[in-house]
Amino acid sequence: MPKTLTIIDNRTGKKYEIPVENDTIKAADLRQIKIRDDDFGMLSYDPALMNTAAVKSRITFIDGDKGILEYRGYPIEQLAENSTSYLEVAYLLINGELPNKQQLEAWRADIKRHTFIHENVKKLTEGFRYDAHPMGTFISTIAALTTFYPDAKEIFDPAMRLTQIHRLIGKATTIAAFSYCHSLGRPLVYPANELSYTGNFLNMMFKIGESRYDVDPVFEHALTVLFILHADHEQNCSTNVMRSIGSSHVDPYSAVAGAAAALWGPLHGGANEAVIRMLDEIGSVSNVSSIINDVKDGKRKLMGFGHRVYKNYDPRAKVIKKLADQVFAVTGRNRKLDIALELERIALEDEYFIKRKLYPNVDFYSGLIYETMGFRMNFFPVLFAIPRIAGWLAHWQEHILDLEQKITRPRQVYIGHRGKTWLPIDKR
Ligand code: COA
């Protein structure tokens, strides 16, 4: 079977043979399609990049129709079930393979060496307004790290790159916890490196002053699984931003800050909060069917349902649903869970949702777990950003080392005016 695509340009009658590789044509091959020799050549127009592959990647595989998600070839269900720590999965994403025992120990030690932040970074987090949104503080503080580590601009030095990766993963939880405690006026708690990555984070979040705080192993496990599930999701909006900023060869702190800013938007990292607000508004199981009717009448959307890529049950949502049961066994049942379960039950049986392939996504249950564990809603995007840093860094590294890549610079279809004549202000 010839691996080409034949295009006939009906404007000129000319025929073109375009090579096909991985079921894909190179957009640049369209440029030979011209009417006149001095034409720029054919472009493909793709708002929101819905059908454009801009990278070749070996990090994360998604089959949205079948509901499959794999990191470096390992199904997400296996990683969530068997990985003993988030750092193990972060290693997998960044280095391409699961670590052996020695590699994991060394990786852990390297990251824990970087959990403390410079006292001036701490002062910076304290300088934000008393009620600053923790995500705003988080993004700004990550960006500020570039001023503390000027060596980070040496992005083609593998050792330097690795040091920044350790620093970013190590400091993310500390900066996040400081942002949260500051927004509540709580004393800041320094890292306790004898604890696990998520155990230390919970300790910094919920320990108050010198009083004893024992990390609940169920919460620690739940957070580990949630971090693993959120660690990467191939070319989503924030990862695309990470790659795009990184393509200018700026340092990784600036790029991660930009990616985190993209994540903050309600269309990306904000949906789990929207689910909680929706469940609060519904109020009781008896109101569920009228909400479903409103959704079917096009009056509103069911938050936490539907996905651009998954046209099947989001594999992460399945894991999270099981996890919710474990957490609620400790905390007592969250009243909103009953509403969520009823919503899911009715929706999955309803023709409207079946026809449109609308299933619960990762956000449908994650917010419920976070809320039950004691996190405030404005912290949900930070909880998403912390584990995604490993994914962003894996993509950043892959991107800057990819010889086919250059600085990202899309084209446009210009539809504005041309050649106008400037007029003095009193003549306009
Ligand atoms: N509730 C009700 N109907 C929904 C829906 C939802 N959550 N999500 C999609 N639909 C409907 C659309 O109205 C559309 O119906 P139509 O064909 O009659 O016009 C159809 O399903 C296709 O939806 P579309 O908007 O084209 O899908 P998309 O890929 O552009 O959007 C989302 C994907 C995630 C933005 C969208 O499903 C959504 O807004 N979900 C709720 C927010 C959310 O949970 N986001 C987190 C994603 S992880």
Image: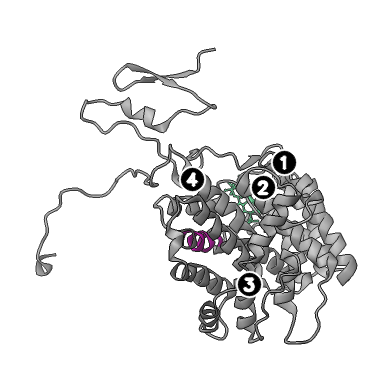
Residue shown at the point (57%, 63%) measured from the top left: 167
Say which quarter of the image contains residue 38: top left
Q: Identify the residue under disc 1.
A: 74
Q: From the viewer's perspective, is residue 265 above or below residue 70? A: below
x, y (%) of residue 353? 71, 46
Q: Is the shortest distance between ligand 1 and the CB of mark 1 under 8 Å?
A: no
Instruction: Give the alpha-carbon distance from disc 4 to disc 1, as whole Å.
Output: 21 Å
Q: Identify the residue under disc 3.
A: 174
First reached walking from the N terminus: tag 4 or tag 1: 1
Secondary structure mainly formed by the magenta segment: helix
Q: Identify the residue under disc 2.
A: 92
Instruction: Give the alpha-carbon distance from disc 3 to disc 2, as whole Å.
Output: 22 Å
Q: Is the shortest distance between ligand 1 and the CB of mark 3 under 8 Å?
A: no
x, y (%) of residue 101? 76, 50
Please state the extent of the stretch shown in magenta in the rendering: 255-263
Comparing labels 2 and 1, the label whose residue is closer to the camera = 2
Pointer 2 and pointer 1: residues touching (CB < 8 Å)? yes
Instruction: Give the alpha-carbon distance from disc 2 to disc 1, as whole Å.
Output: 10 Å
Tag shown at residue 423: none
Instruction: Look at label 4 and name its amino acid.
Output: His
Pointer 4 and pointer 2: residues touching (CB < 8 Å)? no
Mark 1: secondary structure: strand
Using the rendered image of the protein, determine whether residue 229 is visible from the camera's viewpoint: yes
Instruction: Look at label 3 and name its amino acid.
Output: Thr
Pointer 4 and pointer 1: residues touching (CB < 8 Å)? no
Q: Is the shortest distance between ligand 1 and the CB of mark 2 under 8 Å?
A: no
Instruction: Look at label 1 and name its amino acid.
Output: Tyr
